[in-house]
Image (tube, rainbow, N blue to C red):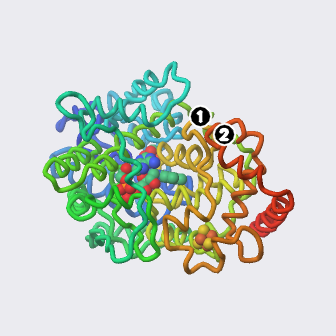
C-alpha cells in the first residue's frame, strides 16, 4: 500500500502531542526525521547543543518505532545524506511517494520561508500546521498586538494568566492580590546559602555514539562537548524538572537575578534546552509549579516568578518574533557597528564578570538570564557591537538557542536594536549593578568603584560614554531622565576624560 502521509518531525519538535503527529496512521504513514549538516552549521552551534539535539532525536525516533509508527530516520553519517532538510524531504518523497506531507511550523524564519516553497518543489501538497505547543498562536498574538501603541510584556502576561487560569483565585483575581512579584526577585546571594546541585544524567549508549560523531565532525565549533550530562529523553527531562521543583523552586524567586562565581546555576530550572526541543511541555511545567505552591512547598514569589517566565516572557518573545520578522533582524536603532570582540570566543579578557560568564558558556552551553542580559549583553550594548554579530554569537553558544527566542532577547532586550519594541529603555548598566548582584568584582583586576583612571571598571567608563554618545535619543525617553540629569550635571572635564578613556578601551577591543 502506498504511503498516505509523510510526516516530517524536526529536531526541536520532539513531542508526542505535536500537531503533525496527532492524527498519525500507524498502517499507512511514515515519519521522517533527518540529521543534517546544514542544521548543525548554519551558525557554529555549541557541540553540546548538537549532541543534545541529535541524541534526543534518536531517542524520540526509537520511541515512535516502539509504538508501532514507521520512522524513516536519516543519520548524519548515512551514505548520501544530502545535508539539508529540504533535500532530505525531496529524497524521502521520491522513496515513499506519499499523497501529502505534513509538518509543524518551524521556530525560525529562515526555515519557514524555505518551507513555503516545498510544495512547489516536490509536487505534493504540504500541510504546515500551527505549533500548538505554544499557548498563544501567531495569529492570536497578532490580534492581541493589533491597535496597541506599545506591546508591553506585563499586559500580555496578565492576559495569559486569565487564559490559563494559572495562579488565579476562584473570583478571577491574581493570587496574592498582585500580578507580579518582580520586586521580590532581586536579592543578592548571601554568604552561606548553598544552591542545590542540578541533576546530571549519565550518557547512555545512544548518547555516547552521538558524542563520538559530534567529536569527529564539529571539533572546530566553540564549546566543550564533555562532560555531557544533559537530559535527552522526555523521562530524564521530567526527572530533572522534578528535582528543580523539589530543591530549587522554593528560592527561585528570591535569587533569580543573582550571580555568583562559585554557583553557576543558582536556583534556576535549567529546562530551557529541553523545553525548546519538546521534551517538556510548558503548560504542564507551570501546572506542576502551581501545584507546589498550592501544597505549601513553594512561596508565591517563586511560583509566580517561574510561571511569568514561561507564560509571560517565553510566549511574548515568540509572538514578537513572528509579528516583526523578517525586518526585525535588520533593525539597528543605535547604529552599532563594532565587530564582536575576540574574547567572546577565546575567553581571554581580564574583566572578571565577562571571563566567568563566557567561560561558563563555553563549558556548559548555559548561562542564566542575568548573565546573558547584564554581563555579555550589557557589554555588547555599551560597546556598540553590531547586532547581527552579537545575535549570531548567542544563537551559536547556548544549548537552548533558537532564533524565535534568541533574537528578541538579544536584538531587542539586550541591545535595544529594535528601538524599543521589547524594552521601554535600554538595559544599560555600569559596574555598580554587576557588583550589587554578584561577587565577580571582588576578584577583578579593575576597581568597580573607580569611574576613571587606569583601574576604572570598563563597564563604568563605557556606561557613561554610552549615555553621552546617545544623549539626544535617550533624552526623549522619560524613563532615562534621572540618569541623563546625572550625566548633564557631570563637569565637562570629567566627561572628556570618560570619553577619551572609553575610546582607549574601544580601540583596544578592535
Ligand atoms: P529559568 O531562569 O529557570 O526560567 C525558567 C524558564 O523561563 C526558562 O527555561 C525559559 O524557558 C523561560 N524564560 C525565562 N526568561 C525568558 C526570556 N527572557 N525569554 C524566553 N523565555 C524565558 N532563552 C532561550 O530559551 N533560548 C535563547 O536562545 C535565549 N537567548 C537569550 C539571549 C539573551 C541576550 C537573553 C537576555 C536571554 C535569553 N534567553 C534565551 C532567555 C533566558 O536567558 C533563558 O531562557 C534562561 O536563562 C534559561 O535558563 P533556565 O532554564 O535555567 O531558566
Ligand atoms: C538545532 C538542530 C540541529 C543541531 N540539528 C538538527 C538536525 O540535524 N535535524 C533537524 O531536523 N533539526 C535539527 N536542529 C533543529 C533545527 O535547527 C530547528 O528545527 C530549526 O532551527 C527550526 O527551529
Ligand atoms: Fe566586571 Fe567591572 Fe566588576 Fe570587573 S569590576 S567584574 S569588569 S563589573
Q: Which quadrant holds residue 348?
A: bottom right
Quadrant of the rendering where the N terminus is positioned: top left
**SS class of the residue under badge 1?**
loop
Q: Which residue is mark 1?
A: 326
Image spot of residue 437 (x, y percent): 49, 64
Image spot of residue 240 (x, y percent): 25, 62
Mark 1 and ligand 2: say if the CB distance to the nearest ligand atom is below 8 Å. Answer: no
Tell me if I can see residue 125 in this picture. yes
Q: Which quadrant holds residue 334?
A: top right
**SS class of the residue under badge 2?**
helix
Neighbours of disc 2 within 10 Å: few (<14), some (14-19), many (20+):
few
| Foreground residue among 348 and 487 | 487
Image spot of residue 461 (x, y percent): 73, 63
Neighbours of disc 1 within 10 Å: few (<14), some (14-19), many (20+):
few
Quadrant of the rendering where the C terminus is positioned: bottom right
Q: Is residue 123 above or below residue 297?
A: above
* 149 lies left or right of 464: left
Number of the label disc, if any, that sits on residue 359: none
Q: Residue at x 38, y 35 (%)?
A: 157
Q: Is residue 459 above or below residue 64?
A: below
* 347 lies left or right of 199: right
Mark 2 and ligand 1: say if the CB distance to the nearest ligand atom is below 8 Å. Answer: no
Q: Which residue is mark 2?
A: 330
* Distance from the alpha carbon under mark 2 to that under mark 1: 8 Å
Amino acid at each position: 500500500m502506498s504511503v498516505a502521509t509523510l510526516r516530517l518531525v524536526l529536531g526541536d519538535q520532539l513531542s508526542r502531542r505535536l500537531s503533525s503527529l496527532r492524527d498519525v496512521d500507524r498502517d499507512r504513514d511514515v515519519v521522517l526525521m533527518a540529521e543534517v549538516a546544514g542544521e548543525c552549521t548554519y551558525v557554529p552551534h555549541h557541540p553540546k547543543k548538537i549532541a543534545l539535539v541529535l541524541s534526543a532525536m534518536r531517542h524520540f525516533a526509537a520511541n515512535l518505532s516502539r509504538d508501532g509508527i514507521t520512522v524513516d530516520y536519516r543519520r548524519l553519517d548515512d551514505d548520501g545524506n544530502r545535508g539539508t532538510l529540504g533535500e532530505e524531504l525531496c529524497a524521502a518523497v521520491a522513496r515513499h511517494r506519499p499523497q501529502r506531507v505534513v509538518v509543524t511550523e518551524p521556530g525560525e524564519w529562515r526555515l519557514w520561508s524555505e518551507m513555503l516553497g516545498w510544495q512547489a518543489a516536490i509536487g505534493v501538497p504540504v500541510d504546515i500546521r500551527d505549533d500548538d505547543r505554544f499557548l498563544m498562536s501567531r495569529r492570536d498574538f497578532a490580534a492581541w498586538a493589533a491597535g496597541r501603541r506599545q506591546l508591553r510584556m506585563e499586559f500580555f502576561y496578565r492576559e495569559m494568566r486569565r487564559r490559563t487560569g494559572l495562579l488565579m483565585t476562584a473570583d478571577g483575581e491574581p493570587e496574592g492580590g498582585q500580578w507580579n512579584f518582580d520586586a521580590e526577585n532581586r536579592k543578592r546571594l548571601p554568604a552561606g546559602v548553598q544552591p542545590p546541585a542540578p541533576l546530571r544524567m549519565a550518557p547512555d549508549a545512544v548518547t555516547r555514539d552521538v558524542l563520538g560523531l559530534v567529536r569527529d565532525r564539529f571539533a572546530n565549533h566553540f564549546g566543550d562537548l564533555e562532560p555531557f550530562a544533559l537530559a535527552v529523553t522526555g523521562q530524564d527531562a521530567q526527572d530533572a524538572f522534578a528535582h528543580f521543583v523539589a530543591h530549587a523552586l522554593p528560592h527561585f524567586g528570591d535569587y533569580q537575578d543573582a550571580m555568583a562565581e562559585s554557583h553557576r546555576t543558582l536556583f534556576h530550572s535549567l529546562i530551557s534546552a529541553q523545553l525548546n526541543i519538546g521534551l517538556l511541555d510548558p503548560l504542564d511545567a507551570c501546572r506542576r509549579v502551581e501545584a507546589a505552591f498550592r501544597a505549601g512547598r513553594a512561596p508565591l514569589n517563586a511560583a509566580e516568578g517561574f510561571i511569568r517566565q514561561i507564560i509571560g516572557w517565553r510566549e511574548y518573545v515568540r509572538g514578537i518574533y513572528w509579528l516583526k520578522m523578517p525586518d526585525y533582524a535588520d533593525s539597528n536603532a543605535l547604529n552599532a557597528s563594532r565587530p564582536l570582540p575576540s574574547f567572546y570566543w577565546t575567553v581571554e579578557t581580564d574583566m572578571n564578570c565577562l571571563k566567568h560568564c563566557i567561560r561558563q558558556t563555553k563549558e556548559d552551553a548555559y548561562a542564566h538570564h542575568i548573565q546573558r542580559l547584564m554581563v555579555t549583553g550589557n557589554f555588547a550594548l555599551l560597546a556598540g557591537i553590531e547586532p547581527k554579530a552579537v545575535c549570531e554569537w548567542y544563537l551559536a553558544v547556548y544549548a537552548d538557542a533558537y532564533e524565535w527566542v534568541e533574537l528578541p532577547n538579544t536584538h531587542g532586550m539586550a541591545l535595544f536594536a529594535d528601538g524599543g519594541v521589547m524594552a521601554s529603555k535600554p538595559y544599560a548598566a555600569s559596574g555598580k549593578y554587576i557588583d550589587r548582584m554578584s561577587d565577580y568584582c571582588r576578584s577583578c583586576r579593575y576597581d568597580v568603584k573607580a569611574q576613571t583612571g587606569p583601574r576604572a571598571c570598563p563597564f563604568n567608563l563605557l556606561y557613561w560614554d554610552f549615555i553621552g554618545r546617545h544623549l539626544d535619543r535617550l533624552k526623549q525617553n522619560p524613563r532615562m531622565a534621572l540618569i541623563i540629569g546625572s550625566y548633564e550635571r557631570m563637569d565637562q572635564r570629567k566627561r572628556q576624560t570618560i570619553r577619551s578613556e572609553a575610546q582607549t578601551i574601544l580601540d583596544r577591543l578592535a
